[in-house]
Image (cartoon, rainbow, N blue to C red):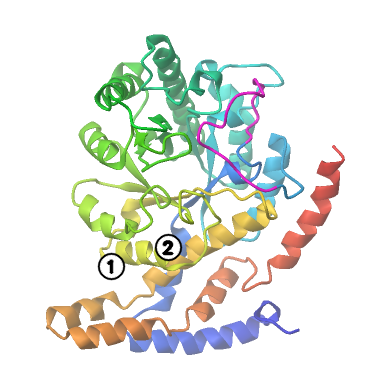
Amino acid sequence: MRTLSHSTEEEIAARYETARDIYADYGVDTELAIEHALRIPISMHCWQGDDVAGLEVRDPAASGGGILATGGHPGRARTGDELREDYDEVLDLVPGEIRLNLHAMYAETGGQKVDRDALTPEHFARWMDWGAERGVDLDFNPTYFAHPRADDGFTLSHADEGVRSFWIAHGRACRRIAEAMARKQGSPCVLNHWIPDGAKDSPADRWSPRARLVEALDAVLDEAAGVDRSLCLDAVEGKLFGLGSEDYVVGSHEFYSHYALTRRILLCLDMGHFHPTESVADKLSALLPFHPELLLHTSRPIRWDSDHVVIFNDDLRTVFLEAARGGALDRIRVALDFFDASIHRVSAYVIGIRATRLALLHALLDPSDALRELEAAGRGAEKLAWMEQTRLLPLGAVWDMACLRDSVPPGLAWLPAAAAHEARVVERRRNG
């Protein structure tokens, strides 16, 4: 059956010329939109490739700490080399600038057990070398979960000072690692602190854990540590609820919004960390007048924070459309956060990254200036009609051209390469 994936470059170019003229009628320059969409970095998360298992030598009985990847599709990466093999494949199939977002649990320690408070940049040297070779800059995350000192659901807000001290030391170690990554790659490294602390059922004291978390985070960020804040860009990520913290999350959205603002660090909005009826898009115009930048995690919740593979749905379209209409796309750092162990993991990456890039392109093709003029003139019916009509504009033709411009497969043409990768690695990994 003939599909778009078999279109020739000449056919794609012809469709693009027609689409370019149609968009021009709405006052949109498709060339500028493609150029802008391709240069916005998307930070690919490492943990989709191995179902959030990590590479540590650690106690196998350690809990997930609110993280759970479901499904048993064969071919999970088990080593750093296997993960990098998968990332190499992904990079060949997605357009635009890509970064890699690493968690501390992906340290490579040569088979030696190194606890998280003792991690150093050397334990991530192979990742930094790979990034330099592939032209992929790195971001980083402390891992405040899947550890014996996180088994009761509390880390930096723990009532035990010894437990808090351990996690403070881990956070400080990660800031030094992020700074080293930034120096090697010549660009800042975003260090995102997601902390799963919370309670399954109604706590009697909601105040003390939050007070302890403020104190502990301040200790992590202590200027005396000597980490260059222009290289290590700290971020904090709130959440409505999680596994084991259904009633109470210490680091809620409100908590971190104010913490980030007063400490001059990044606030992270994860699209799966709010009530299903909340609009993350609406939060942008409420937060960006006060926060210089935001970190955005694209994810897809289904009824709860289930971290499904990102697709080009209304939530994804709307959040970037709102950012573009506010001229704020370049004030948002984009990263991915999902994990699905039920399908080919490389394909999951490709679908999620391409959907996120497509949403960026869609936003940049919006006739925002014309819509604002209609609204300002009180011509509400015409504005609404224009908004409806934009749904029918030939986005796909511009997307295929964007893929060709960046030398990656357009349409569904990436599927054979992904299938070949799956066939190549599954049997090898299954047999050890």
The residue shown at (19%, 52%) is 289
> What percent of the width, then of the height, locates residue 377?
12, 83
Residues in magenta? 53-71
Within-10-Å neighbours for mark 1: few <14, some 14–19, many 20+: some
Q: Quadrant of the C terminus?
A: top right
Magenta stretch prevailing secondary structure:
loop
Q: Amino acid at mark 1?
A: Arg
**Percent from the top left, x then y, of residue 167?**
44, 19
65 is within the stretch colored magenta: yes
Which kind of residue does numbered mark 2 sit on? Leu
| Residue 277, quarter of the rendered image | bottom left
The image's mark for residue 316 is 2
- At which x and y percent is residue 220? 36, 21
In the picture, measured across the screen, residue 410 lies left or right of residue 316, that is right
Name the residue at 21% across, 54% down.
286
Q: Residue at x 68, y 76 (%)?
A: 5
Which element type, helix, strand or loop, lies under badge 1?
Answer: helix
Q: Earlier in the sequence, mark 1 or mark 2?
A: 2
Whether residue 397 is in magenta: the answer is no
Task: Please give the label number shown on residue 325.
Answer: 1
Q: Nearer the viewer, residue 109 or 186?
A: 109
431 w.r.t. 312: above or below: above
Q: Nearer the viewer, mark 1 or mark 2?
A: 2
Tell me if residue 238 can be seen: yes
